[in-house]
Every structure is written in structure tokens, then in C-alpha cells.
Amino acid sequence: MNVSAISAATPQKAQNVNFSGLTDGVAKVMSKVGNSDAFVKGMDKIGNSKNLMTNLSTASSAVTTGLYIYKNLTDKKKSKNEKITMALNQALTFAVSTALTYTVVGALKGKTNKLANRFGELMAQKGGKTAKEMEMLQAGARNAIDLVICSSINRFITPVAITPVANKLGAKLTDKLDARDAAKAQQASQKA
């Protein structure tokens, strides 16, 4: 890779960007959050859960969804219809994908455990692993399977299914809000 060619193509202003203040600030905030009693208790609870990957995936999605909804509702470049539809899409996608994820992960738990146990046994036979190592491989396989299920549902299946529904609901809600606003404006003009 020719790094000097990349550096030459990068504008001078971009080459002189210093992120140390930003990274220090993020580190300080993360340190405070990570050392808080609430965070430690929450991580203890989540870490000891049988649904570790599902819980972490859901927590991550909740934060991401909340930020997307906030950004959509406060974006001045978007119309009211776009704001409502996009925020509704995000909220519905999160709600449906969370319910679907926990349902599917729970329903497949028996098969997931069998598959993970078989994987651990095969790896132990091939690699001469100890019982403890085999248990770790099995736990890792269970978590990996759960993560694949969560990601598939959260990032592909639900958004594809929900977007058309959210578009229709957003259009109906916007029409109702527009009609309400028009009625209020008409009442105000009649009083004046």
C-alpha cells in the first residue's frame, strides 16, 4: 500500500486533525460510566444471564435506535412527514425485532444447545481439549449462534418487513396531524 500517495491525496487540513481532546473526553466519560455502581450492577446481571448476546444486542439496538429517532425528529432538513415516518420506522423496527429476537432465540434454545455441544465435542476430539476448554468452546458457540440470530433479525429481516408498514402508518399519521393543524388554523382565523 502506498501510504505517501494517500497522504498526498489527503487535504492538508485533514492531515492536521488532532483527535486527542476527543479521545480523552470519550475516555473520561466511559471511565465514569464504567465505574458507576449502576453500570457494574447492570453488567453483573447481564453477564450472568443465559441470554448474554441477546441482551447485549438489544441494549446496543436500544441506544442506536434512540439516537436515530432523536436525530430524525430534530433534523431541520427533513419534512414533517419524513421525520414522523423515519422515527416511526425506527421505533417499530426496534420493538418488533426485540420481540422477535427473544422469541426465536428462546424457541431455538434446545437446538442451539445441541449444536453448540456437538461443536465443543468435535473440537475436543480433534484438538485434545480439556473438559473446561470444551465447555468454553460450547459457550462461545452458543453465544455466536445467538448473535447471528439477533443480527439477522435486527439488521435484515425486521427492517425489510417493517419499512413498508411504517411508511403507510407515517403517511396516515402525518395526514391526521395536518388535518388537525388545518382545523386549528381555521378556528384561529375565524376568531380573529
Image: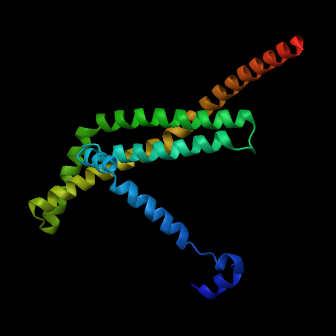
- The foreground one among 65 and 107 is 65
- The foreground one among 159 and 127 is 159
Which residue in the rendered view is the most extreme toward the left? 131
Residue lying at 23% horizontally and 46% vertically, measured from the top left: 48
- Does 21 appear above or below 98? below
Residue 76 placed where, x, y %? 74, 43
Residue lying at 41% horizontally and 32% vertically, measured from the top left: 99
Image quadrant assignment for residue 133: bottom left
Residue lying at 35% horizontally and 43% vertically, measured from the top left: 55
Image quadrant assignment for residue 192: top right
Is residue 101 visible in the rendered structure shown here?
yes
**Side of 22 where 100 appears, left or right:** left
**Side of 164 where 23 appears, left or right:** left
Which residue in the rendered view is the most extreme toward the front? 192
Residue 67 placed where, x, y %? 55, 45
**Side of 96 where 131 appears, left or right:** left
